[in-house]
Image: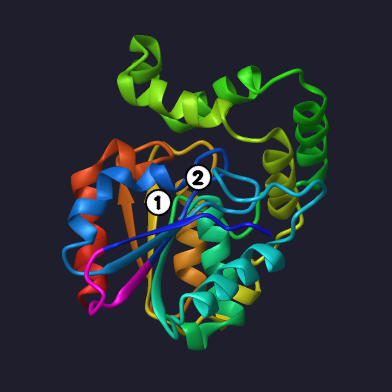
Amino acid sequence: MRMAYRIDGPADRPVLILSNSIGTSLHMWDGQIDALARNYRVVRYDTRGHGKSGAPLGAYSLDRLGRDVIELMDELQIDRAHFLGLSLGGFVGQWLGIHSPERIDRLVLANTSPYLGPARQWDAAIHAVEQAPDMKETAEMFLRNWFPAQWMESDAPVVKEFRAMLLATDRHGIAGAWAAVRDADLRRTIALINRPTLVIAGRHDTVTAASHGEAIAAAIPGARLVVLPVVHLSNIEQPEQFIQTVTDFLEG
């Protein structure tokens, strides 16, 4: 399968891999690249089913999404890397911390959860997006969950930017990724993560509630928790605070 990726920053710096949320592409990180690429070799990629990566039909698994990262690291000859994942990317980060800790240095899990059940809600959503004539209704649902109400009411430029990203996303990629979330339950196994971990939660997040971030931080030995005054896309809503929080942690 085709995997789209982009690399920024000096070749001699530690590698930092960025993993996007459902419905976005590697461009969700555009605003953070200048700051991160000063001190890191930043590798960002389009998750399977998103952006310019392939979008195979059918359900994806978290195991498959995690192995996509390992295979990309192998292809780029990266032995170890820091990993920052937001939302779905955070699910992938948890999988990597559990199953491939030898490939991870420091782990940042932003606006994510170890479990988002029950399964039947995802089955209904998957059926709806697969049957819909286009992505318009799904896009607006995502946007309402991602951004403050005042941003939506004013149709802020960033809302338009992410609406375009959503409308360009393959519906089958959305459905496949939702299946991975539907079938994931990491509530017990994240206690196995032994990498230094930072959990970032959003105080006003209605998708992956702050309590979910608190649960992750409580389960992973030694994990640090930071709760930002944001909804879901913390890197977009509070970019300066987000970057400062991440870089302080990565620099140890």
Disc 2 and disc 1 in contact, CB within 8 angstroms: yes
Q: Label 1 sits on what residue type? A: Ala
Task: Return the residue nearer the eye: 167 or 63.
Answer: 167
Residue occupying the point 38% across, 11% down: 153
Residue 139 in the image: state x and y as whole percent.
Answer: 57, 24
Let me know if residue 84 is in the magenta part.
no
Q: Tell me if 10 is positioned left or right of 135 in this view.
A: left
Task: Return the residue nearer the eye: 144 or 3.
Answer: 3
Q: Label 2 sits on what residue type? A: Ala
Residue 151 in the image: state x and y as whole percent.
Answer: 34, 19
Residue 14 in the image: state x and y as whole percent.
Answer: 28, 78
Q: Is residue 81 above or below residue 243?
A: below
Label of residue 233 in the image: none
Q: In the rendered image, which residue does mark 2 sit on?
A: 209
Per the model, the C-alpha gap separating discs 2 and 1 is 7 Å
Q: Quadrant of residue 180?
A: bottom right
Q: Is residue 41 above or below residue 46?
A: below
Residue occupying the point 40% across, 17% down: 152
Residue lying at the far bottom of the rendered structure:
102
Question: What segment is highlighted magenta in the picture?
Answer: 9-16
Q: In the rendered image, which residue does mark 1 sit on?
A: 201
Main SS of the magenta segment?
loop
Question: Which of the two labelled residues, at mark 2 and mark 1, occupies the earlier sequence position?
Answer: 1
Residue 220 in the image: state x and y as whole percent.
Answer: 48, 75
